[in-house]
Amino acid sequence: VMLLAGMVGASLVFGVLLADYSHTRLVQVVQGTAVAAVLLNGLAMWKQEPRNSLRVKQAAPRESFAVHWQRFASQPQVKRFLFAVGLGTAAFNMQDVILEPYGGEIMKLGVSATTQLTALMAGGALLAFALAARTLARGGDPQRVAAVGVLFGLAGFSAVIFAEPVDAPSLFRIGATLIGFGGGFFAVGTLSAAMALEGHGMNGLVLGAWGAVQATCAGVAVALGGALRDLVSHAATAGWLGEALQSPATGYAAVYHLELAMLFATLIVLGPLVRRGSIVKQPPSSPRFGLAEFPG
């Protein structure tokens, strides 16, 4: 939530600062952001983990990570669940570095307007967090919550794709908001499903696996999305794909269509988990969803 709140606030500030755009102003904004990031991270880490030599001397022997992982991965449907997390995360994040260039190059939005797209996506995700928490607090199935997020993502990417041929910047903004909303629903749903797994004393490993899969797939997807956009755009503008596709928008559309296909694949992977319910054990009563739900 704090990450998204920071993105919303920073995007709005950047939009104001870059309204009167110049290259010098852009460099100044980037420099100021870097200084603020260093200061905030230094403040966050200050005295978080004080030295304690006794803890090192008294450390008990531990089983290897491989043993823990084998025990965790042997549970029913765990691998399918992690595959769904990775596939869905990649689908939502592949557009991360091309959404604003798409708004500027294809939709002809100004620098300030494209910067505000990040605020729209983050705001949609924050709203999704609140609604997903409310659904889960009422006993909703986390896997279904994640699937609902995928459906919103399908609508969002479709809106972004159709915004270019009909020249509708408002539709483009709606699509960006829906992508953030769907991604938020998907993240909360899969995280809740991970928290509900039978940890057998390995709750840290369960959440660590969810975070590692999500972070790795998001990073790889961002890199692949940018590279694919460049390759397809070069082929299209060079005329290799035919006269009908000889447009810079073709590269962006290729990435968005691939993300649509990946979202459909995510629904296919999630389907058996929702139907069988073999991976999640719902508690008998869950009056609230919040920090108290995280394993200690």
Image (spheres, helix red, strand yellow):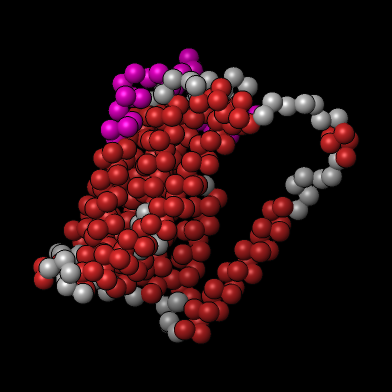
At x 53% / y 35%, what residue is drawn? 209
What x and y, as percent, mark residue 34?
A: 60, 69
Answer yes or no: is residue 67 visible.
yes
Compared with 117, 212 (above or below) is: above
Position in image of residue 200 (x %, y %): 59, 19
* Camera-nearest residue between 54 and 9: 54
Could you tell me which residue is drawn at 50 percent across and 82 percent down?
A: 25
In this picture, residue 252 sits left or right of residue 134? left
Task: Look at the picture and state if 179 lies above or below 248.
Answer: above
Judged left or right of residue 204, residue 174 is left
Asked if residue 274 is among those painted magenta in the image, a careful observer would answer: yes
Q: Give the range drawn in magenta.
A: 267-296
Total numbered labels placed on residues in the image: 0
Q: Where is residue 81 in the image (x, y as percent from the top left)?
A: 41, 30
Query: Does residue 128 show up?
Result: no
Residue 176: quarter of image: bottom left
Q: Is residue 227 magenta?
A: no
Q: Pick the residue in front: 202 or 293.
A: 202
| Lateral position of residue 71 relative to residue 240, left or right | right
Q: Residue at x 42, y 78 (%)?
A: 19
Question: Considering depth in this image, is 124 or 273 the residue closer to the camera?
Answer: 273
